[in-house]
Image (cartoon, rainbow, N blue to C red):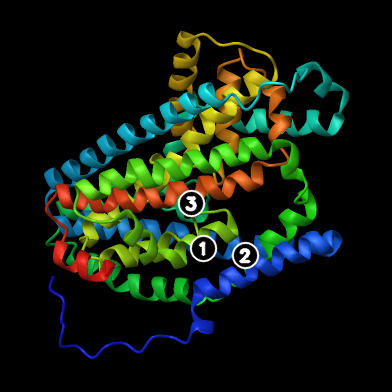
Amino acid sequence: MEVDLSAKPVKPKKWYKVLYFQVIVAIVIGVLLGHFNPGLGQKMQPLADGFISLIKMIIAPVIFVTITVGIASMNDLKKVGRVTGKAFIYFITFSTLALIIGMIVSNLLRPGDGFNFDPASVVKNSDDATKLSSYATSAHDHSFTHFILDIIPKTLMSPLTGENILQVLFAAIMFGIGLSLTAEKSKPVIDFFQAITHPIFKIVELLMKLAPIGAFGAMAFTIGKTGIQSLNKLGELVLIFYGTSAFFVIVVLGLVARYNGFSIFKLIRYIKEEIFLVFGTSSSEPALPGVIKKLEKAGCSSQVVGLVIPTGYSFNLDGTNIYMTLAALFIAQACNVELTLSQQITLLVVAMLSSKGAAGVSGAGFITLAATLVVFPKVPIEGMTLIFGVDKFMSECRALTNFIGNAVATIVVARWEKQLDENVLKEVLK
């Protein structure tokens, strides 16, 4: 792929028509409404829920078609296995590193000290008890022991009507392998899937025009319900989490990017529209189709993008992993539960397994934490009530870190596979 420097430059959009500017304005208006009129702010929740539902409607087809076409177009299953293997080596390495960094920061700064929280007090509050029971049930249903059963769909096409991303991945990989093994006879089917990507991504483009409305509703509801003052008591934990995530992105991923010939800051600028969308909606789902197209335009082969982005969406959760160990040790410190180094290492291993078992759950951060504490009872799950109020503020950071981490992973794996046009990447990132 070469950059056509003689092509007529595309006329830039007027500043007020740019999506990320509209999303920023919507976020600010949502925060102001939620702060000054909490009641009305909470009534904006259907706008956020409606937008997320629209995006979820198209996510499964996007992932299914992208992976299927990626595998089918390779015509070499060894190559598919090599790309997937390298991607998982990357995922496991940096997911584990994220868990370790969260554990180190929590031990150094000890944000939970001084709370002296009594887990038994939660029983007296029926609302909290109900919430914890529901989270514990969800955590058990999506624990690592249920992983195999969760990943296998009832039929090949049933994942397209559900919300389990792992099942979509499984079905798409199987179908893609089938097409690859019968490439000559299946050419009409492969051509059909390649053609259907155009209307699917056009639908995504149309839905993205509603992103400011979704971001406005999400922020108005969050601030209206929890209030900015909810950050006062637990602000230290939130700031530590944001700081740790920023360190991971700028330093850890920054070094990875530099070693692989690109700048993390230029990459962040390139995908800024998707980043603001993730921040506004607290979910990486709305930005998934957009980042797939942008990484392809940046010189990554469609085959690598089609394999790495969807699988990373479920297995490369750097932000969630930082949150897991940081929040779990915060709860332990707040409940005056001292963990030895060996117990913390055990907690880290449990968190690693739990994060994979809950990978297909939408908004898996809180569920994954519950899954970890259910399996590791040394830290009382009742302590999760401490972070109910501020979890929404941390979910945005989780989603952002996960999202940026997957963008970096895709470029790195593409470079490893020599399926990255570095000239195009440099030109686009300028």
Real-space CA distance between mark 1 and mark 2, rounded to the nearest whole angstrom: 9 Å
Q: Residue at x 55, y 24 (%)?
A: 372
Real-space CA distance between mark 2 and mark 3, rounded to the nearest whole angstrom: 14 Å
**98 shown above or below 225:** above
Disc 2 secondary structure class: helix
**4 shown above or below 271:** below
Q: Please name the amino acid that badge 3 sits on.
A: Leu
Q: Upstream in the sequence, badge 1 or badge 3?
A: 1
x, y percent for residue 378: 61, 12
Q: Write down the residue under mark 1.
A: 276
Q: Are marks 1 and 2 in contact (CB under 8 Å)?
A: yes
- Please state if 99 lies on the left or on the right of 34 as rendered: left
Q: Please name the amino acid that badge 1 sits on.
A: Phe
Q: Write down the residue under mark 3.
A: 400
Q: Residue at x 20, y 52 (%)?
A: 414
Disc 1 secondary structure class: helix
Q: Upstream in the sequence, badge 2 or badge 3?
A: 2
Q: Is residue 277 visible?
A: yes
Disc 3 secondary structure class: helix
Q: Are marks 2 and 3 in contact (CB under 8 Å)?
A: no
Q: Write down the residue under mark 2.
A: 215
